[in-house]
Amino acid sequence: MQANDFFMPEGTYLLSHSVGRMLKTAPAYFTEQFFEPWQQQNREPWAQWLAGVMQFNQALAKLLNGHADNFCPQANLSSGLTKWLMSQSSLQNRRVRVLLSEDDFPSMGFVLQQALDDVELCFIPAGEDMSALSTWQAHLNQHYDLVFVSHVYSNTGQQAPVLDIIPLAKQLGCKVIVDIAQSAGILDVDLSLWQADCVLGSCVKWLCGGPGAGFLWVSNESLAMCAPKDVGWFSHQNPFEFDIHHFAAHDTALRFWGGTPSVAPYIMAANSIDALNEFGIERIRAHNLQLLARIWQALPQLCTSPKNAEQCSGTLIMNTGSKLETCLHALTEQNIAVDARRYGLRISPHIYNNAAEVEQFVEVINSLT
């Protein structure tokens, strides 16, 4: 797999933390799996479409070392989190205390605030090192009901030690929710090993699957206790039973699916997940680290995100101080695509980036700082 396998614009694209590039195989695959059953067959195309969605679940299961039955397609993380929270009878009719970070993606905080009737959000202050287990040890205690963890913090480039946080939280009686939107496709994620209660993700970033293909993963233990409120005919054990007097929740995580589903985003994303699975996420990560290392070496004084593989994400954060806007303008002039958030520039080299592109980025920043 290389740059030529993707639709790449002129210039340098370093925005995989936002939207990954489309594979060149995507249009033909989508036509075959989505349009052709609709265009050419003299029957409804649901069988083929739903098979395509199940391929999405199976591809995720392979990627994340889980089982397809524990995944449910969702439009986005907010939808998945809302449905899971509302399905938990143990979180209803009482005050729920949640530990999360001020550096979590705001949408997750919004959902936690609104989906629970009586909730107290307790924040680890912004700027703390979320990649250090000691940070979590200092804040976690038995008074929390839920712990929300971002595997990767998009504004800081920090990677949380999820494998250590989950057992620590569970020993204290907390349920654990993990957001892998910024890590799926670039970092190793082993859901069977993690054993979180709920995991949320998206395919629009490193997985290059486009928007709309989010997902919810629920552990077997949690699934057994889930009673979703936001349901529809595709939440039913037999969606085609068509008996309005009888609802039987699906045995799998598909009980969270709801009404008539969207299928196009999942068919599109399944193609990219399969391709990245075949190539190997570990090879993508090795390439990513090699390119990040060149920036660390050239501009160490500007790099504020961690500089080792165990604590850094796929995204490097660079603080150029008062020259931020100048740097953004110069990079745009050189057709180098990055963005900026609270802590500075965000730079995310993927498998379709190369050393020459990183050198050009370094030269631009060096010339201004």
Image (cartoon, grey):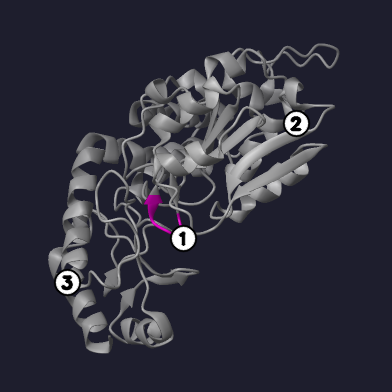
Residue 43 on image: x %, y %: 57, 28
Most distant residue in the front direction: 138
Region of the chain picked out in magenta, as a range: 154-158
Identify the residue position indicated by label 3 in the image. Answer: 298
Between residue 242 and residue 292, name the one nearer to us.
292
Between residue 241 and residue 227, name the one nearer to us.
227
Identify the residue position indicated by label 2 in the image. Answer: 230
Between residue 226 and residue 146, name the one nearer to us.
146
Q: Amino acid at mark 3?
A: Ala
Q: Main secondary structure of the magenta part?
A: loop
Secondary-structure class at tag 2: loop
Earlier in the chain: of badge 1 and badge 2, it is 1
- Quarter of the image for residue 82 reads top right
Residue 218 seen in this snapshot = no
Mark 2 crowd level (few <14, some 14–19, many ≥20, 10 Å Cα): some
Secondary-structure class at tag 1: loop
Real-space Cα separation, disc 3 to disc 1, in angstroms: 21 Å
Identify the residue position indicated by label 1 in the image. Answer: 155
Up the image or down, 338 lies above or below 99; here it is: below
Task: Please name the residue shown 16% across and 64% down the image.
Answer: 294
